[in-house]
Image: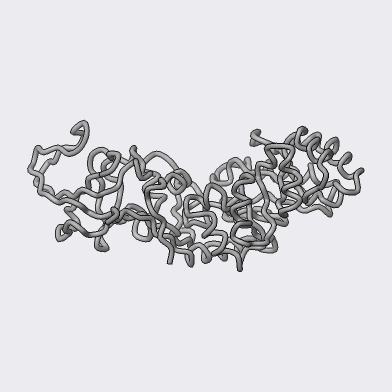
Amino acid sequence: MPRSTVARIDLEALRHNYRLARERAGDARVMAVIKADGYGHGIRQVARALAGEAPRYGVACLEEAMAVRKEGLAQPVVMLQGTHAPEDVALCADQGFQPVMHSDYQLAWLRDAPSTPDFWLKVNTGMNRLGFPADDLTGRVEPLLASPALKSALQGFVTHFACADDHDSSFTLEQTRCFKAAVSPWPDLERSVANSAAHFFPGQELFDWSRPGIMLYGASPIIGVTGPELGLRAAMTLEAPLIARRVLKAGDSVGYGSSWVAEKETPMGIVAVGYGDGYPRHAGTGTPAAVNGKRIRLIGRVSMDMLAVDLSEAPETQAGDRVELWGNQVSVDEVAGHAGTIAYELLTGVTARVPRLYP
């Protein structure tokens, strides 16, 4: 019988979160970003679950776009990194994929391709990863508009916010002003700027298309706020069985390095999950979990396949009981905070040996 450490995926929670994004997007249409295997939730299952909701999907690369098509879904798929090889351009045209082009070599591929897909241009407004310079956009756009095929295929412009998760930063407003000025000569083309965080940024203009990602999966895109506090529902519950229980005496240690020592008699349990499953190794003593409706805490170091929990708040717990590592009782944002990382990393890092279970 297989080990019962699993990730339960709540597709109705996913749909709830998409609808919240749509509500907060106002007049903007909402493409669902499902890259990185649907943020660890399963790209094919996520795409199917949102098929009746999302008019467009966003992915990082061609492989992810093809996974959507293999599900028989016909919505346009926006490839946020554009194409990675010249031969991919014609495939995008054939499959209805919309690459976001960010470099001159990709524009050369477009011009030389036997067929032209609908495409977008990435504008660098200050994040300085990808994109054409905002102050030299005309030099890229006008040659495209001179070609009837490229002119009809150009959908519009995309940028990405660096600090929208921080409401104390003015950089999002600066990027927005930069973007509006850069694309103003072409008012008939579409515009997309809004990541998940921008949906909650006060007064932020979302233009024509928003691109929610992490919020679809129930995690918070805002510093210092959890997903549930934003009205989001956990789409993944990571749970594992308690496989041993004992009572530690004062002075007993547990785990590698003996990093945690009991100060008093303490009921302790061992849970069959560890960093080999994607649970963060740096989640230390005090990281919350839950069992039988009660919150408990981790103690000592996380091992590859196991971790220890203090059962003082749930003394009736027995071996075989299910422990929630994150989900509806314990926000993944809380766990990420204790581990010194972000929910994105935790959700996408759940390894392949953890089965995803769908309703």
For the point 65% across and 59% down, the residue is 30
Please give left or right for residue 42 compared with residue 189 in the image.
left
Q: Position of residue 261 (x, y in %)?
A: 15, 37
The residue lying furthest to the top in this view is 257
Please give left or right for residue 208 compared with residue 278 in the image.
right
For the point 85% across and 38% down, the residue is 138
Q: Where is residue 221 in the image (x, y as percent from the top left)?
A: 51, 50
Q: Nearer the viewer, residue 269 or 147?
A: 147
Residue 145 in which image quadrant: top right
The answer, for residue 286, to whether it is visible in the render is yes
Please give left or right for residue 31 compared with residue 315 in the image.
right
Up the image or down, 179 lies above or below 4; here it is above
Q: Where is residue 71 in the image (x, y as percent from the top left)?
A: 59, 60
The residue lying furthest to the front in this view is 1
Q: In which quarter of the image is the C terminus?
A: bottom left
Identify the coloring.
Answer: one colour
The answer, for residue 201, to whether it is visible in the render is no
Residue 50 in which image quadrant: bottom right
Q: Where is residue 183 in the image (x, y as percent from the top left)?
A: 80, 45
Q: In which quarter of the image is the N terminus?
A: bottom left
Please give left or right for residue 88 compared with residue 313 in the image.
right
Up the image or down, 125 lies above or below 311; here it is above
For the point 20% across and 58% down, the residue is 320
Q: Nearer the viewer, residue 156 or 166?
A: 156
